[in-house]
Amino acid sequence: MSTIIHSPSSGPFDWTPIARDARARVGTLRTLHGGAITPGFMAVGTAAAVKALTPEQVRRTGTEVILGNTYHLAVRPGSSLIRNLGGLHEFMRWDGPILTDSGGFQVFSLAGTRDVDDAGVTFRNHIDGKLLRLGPDEAMRIQTDLGSDIAMVFDECLPATATRSEVEVSLTTRTIPWEIRSLSHRPTDGRAVFAIGQGGLHADLRRACLRELTSLPFDGFAIGGLSVGESHENFLSMLDVSTSSIPELKPRYLMGVGSPRELVEAIGLGTDLFDCVLPTRNARNAQALTWDGPIRLKNAVHATDGKPLDTTCPCEACSQGFSRAYLRHLFAAGEMLAGTLVTAHNLTFLQQIMKQAREAIFAGSYAAWAANFLGRYPASAGLPEDIKER
Ligand SMILES: [Zn+2]
């Protein structure tokens, strides 16, 4: 079964479901900079670049949306510089949709000394230690400077060890008020604002948070604070509670999750959009993703292997016949081409998962396709624990 769907053209933000299979859905996303099909994986371009690839190479992986980061771009080179040079699309020469993360995750994970109050966070940035201020007003202003098609609200990201009462205080005094405040800066030019549901590992708090947020005119809803070290059972049950709490007609975005098994399970629970550094970061660490699990190219077993990473893969590396032995050599020799080729492969691999998932949803066979995928892809993939950093 092969269903060819073309992404919609440019226009004010819109997301429309066009096919359903149980809870999984296919949808079309429209933005001022072109469209995308969901379920879709967004490539992380934190500092206005998807590491190791040109925009054209990113596009050839099947990627339709790039993710930029408010915190990183505000610290360096500064959002006013990007605005004065025509905005982030022009600056990085990517004319497709861009979603910008609000910076909440980075402020709480990367910044040095910080002082959190009810209107935002004052912190020393991790590059030059300068004092900066980020809150709902600043995050929205910076994202307007960047001109992203989808802006994320600023939220407080708590560590996985936060207690229930800490989560409650965070939601009621900071995250939810900050998100509501972000709406006062809602763009009127067709760009979108997504809210972020938090609530730790407490189903009732996640439901209550999303109940409040979904009563407001946000264009889409993200699920934050998952895959931060919780058990797989907790991950699935919190995701289930969250997607069930977001209206059917709104796009659902699971933030920072990109391990192949979790993507397939999340699509089954009705999730539409994803981002993660996993495919790009692991590529630079000589890990290639395949349908049978990740391959560590530094292992000696690949030293004389003349086969490509995957004989069916349409990526730049596999389709041009670059062998596992050659890729292993490039890593050993410290050649930059190694990171480029394996990044192109890994992003293509995740986009192939998305494409097959969409085709299975159209065919009404998602459960069978997912069971087949999960039966083949190993549960314990041995991936690094630090993949959450964005
Ligand atoms: Zn490939």
Image (cartoon, rainbow, N blue to C red):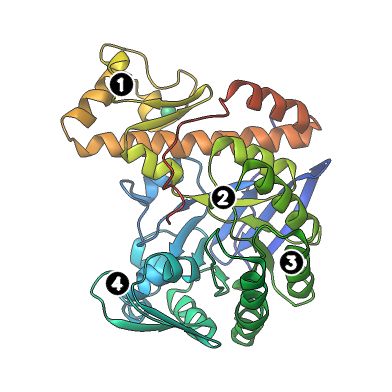
Residue depicted at 66% across the width and 78% down the height = 176
Residue bearing the label numbered 2: 227
Q: Nearer the viewer, residue 174 or 57?
A: 174
Residue bearing the label numbered 3: 205
The correct choice, above or below, for 296 with respect to 179 in the image is above
10 Å neighbourhood of mark 4: few (<14), some, or many (≥20)?
some
Mark 2 or mark 4: name the one nearer the start of the chain. 4
**Marks 4 and 1 close (CB-CB < 8 Å):** no
Residue depicted at 56% across the width and 59% down the height = 34
The type of residue carrying mark 1 is Asn
Residue bearing the label numbered 1: 299
Q: CA distance from mark 4 to mark 1?
A: 37 Å
- In which quadrant is the C terminus drawn? bottom left
Query: Could you say where residue 251 lies in the image, as x and y percent from the top left?
Result: 70, 59
Q: CA distance from mark 2 to mark 3?
A: 17 Å
Mark 4 or mark 1: name the one nearer the start of the chain. 4
The kind of secondary structure element at disc 4 is: loop
Q: Foreground mark, 4 or 1?
A: 1
The kind of secondary structure element at disc 2 is: loop
**Marks 2 and 3 close (CB-CB < 8 Å):** no
The type of residue carrying mark 4 is Arg
**Marks 2 and 4 close (CB-CB < 8 Å):** no
Residue depicted at 43% across the width and 71% down the height = 107
Q: Is residue 1 visible?
A: no
Mark 2 or mark 3: name the one nearer the start of the chain. 3
The type of residue carrying mark 2 is Ser
Q: CA distance from mark 2 to mark 1?
A: 28 Å
Residue bearing the label numbered 4: 76
